Amino acid sequence: MMDEQRKKADANRVGYQPDIQALDELNNRFRKAANARMNKLSPEQRKAAASAGAAARWAKADPERANLPRAEFGNDDRPLKISGMEIPCYVLEDERRVLTANGFQDALKIARGGSMKAGMSRLELFASGKLINPFIAKDLYERVSNPISFITPGGARAYGYEAEILVELCEAVLAARQAGRLMQQQMPIAQQCELIMRGLARVGIVALVDEATGYQVVRKRDALAKILEAYISKELLPWAQRFPLEFYEGIYRLHKWEDLDPASRSKPGYVGKLTNALVYERLPEGVLQQLRTQNPVDHETGKRKFKHHQFLTDEIGNPHLEKHLAKVIGLMQASDSWIEFKRLFKKVFKVEDGEAPRGRGTVRI
């Protein structure tokens, strides 16, 4: 009996012909549904969804990524420029300033790729040379030998060195040249180092003059004006859902407000103060003050007519807001109590104990 059933099953498998037209129709339905969902999202949300998908694929292919530091500022389109050289640079979440390894080597005119020694980069090979190594401090050589692996804002994995290493290595190379210890083929590297040091010296002397004359105050005002221009929209933007429900669900859960509905439009005034403290105060200095100026409290109703985020730019302001909210929500989801969340929040966003709130309408974290 079992043999007959097995023969029938084998015959069915051999004679099976898939319905190609039905499969194509099913695929088209899936594509249309996916496109319809994407069309409902804002450009920032579509970009975030694409980044999340890419991050998920990368995480599966490279599990170590989860433990790597992330860059919060910088991109390849805005490199550090010194004496005609361009070096991609980033600021990591722990505030380390990093230059990419490839950009570093390009600036010194050291060829990319592996060296003649397995497991050693060309920069490390250069630093380990018998002629140059005596001029390189042990600590510097160790840092050259151990580049920082990090994740760029775009989600790619990159390698780099702390920016100070460039100056220290240039000083060592120039000292070796002064002592007549460099080979002829190493002289172009020394020339690049000289150009870099001259470029940095020009920047340094400008900063010193600004400090001596008091112009750094004006420079700071100009910098603030540029920040506000980048973050604050000249026109009121249409309302859009910027704060995910998960943000309010996290606040209510961690405060154990079981009798209140986080989806309700009528929220306690304390929630607004927390929103300022957790979100708007973490935008660059001066942005929240300008938002309050452009979106004042109505004296009759005691409320603001618009949402602060309607005054943020689509290019920089709101994308920064959405990225920040994603981090805050992640910390909330990782916390079991409000006290634990505050500890994580202070650690991640470098909030000093006892830091005073920035004006009225907010609270101390």
Image: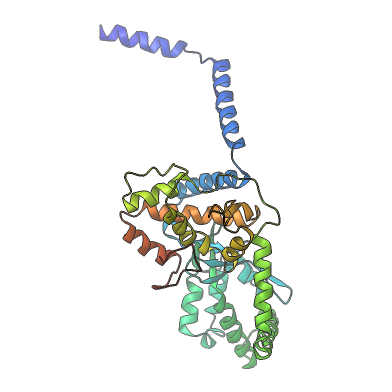
Taking depth in this image into account, of 217 and 20 the one nearest to the observer is: 217
Across and down, in percent, residue 281 comes to 51, 64
**Farthest residue toward the front?**
300
Q: Total label count?
A: 0
47 lies left or right of 199: left
Query: Can residue 77 be seen in this snapshot?
Result: no
Picture residue at 32% right of the left edge, 11% below the top: 6
Image x and y of residue 73, in percent: 57, 64
Residue 160 appearing in the image: yes
Residue furthest out toward the right = 84
Residue at 59 percent of width and 31 percent of height: 36
Give the answer, above or below, for where 284 lies relative to 132.
Answer: above
**Residue at 56% over, 85% down:** 131
Image: 88 above or below 269: below
Quadrant showing the N terminus: top left
Q: Nearer the viewer, residue 92 or 288?
A: 288
Instruction: Report x, y in % for residue 295.
Output: 61, 57
Image position of 133 (left or right of 185): left
Residue 136: x and y in percent read 52, 85
Viewed as shown, does residue 57 lie left or right of 87? left
Q: Quadrant of the C terminus?
A: bottom left
Q: Is residue 338 left or right of residue 239?
A: left
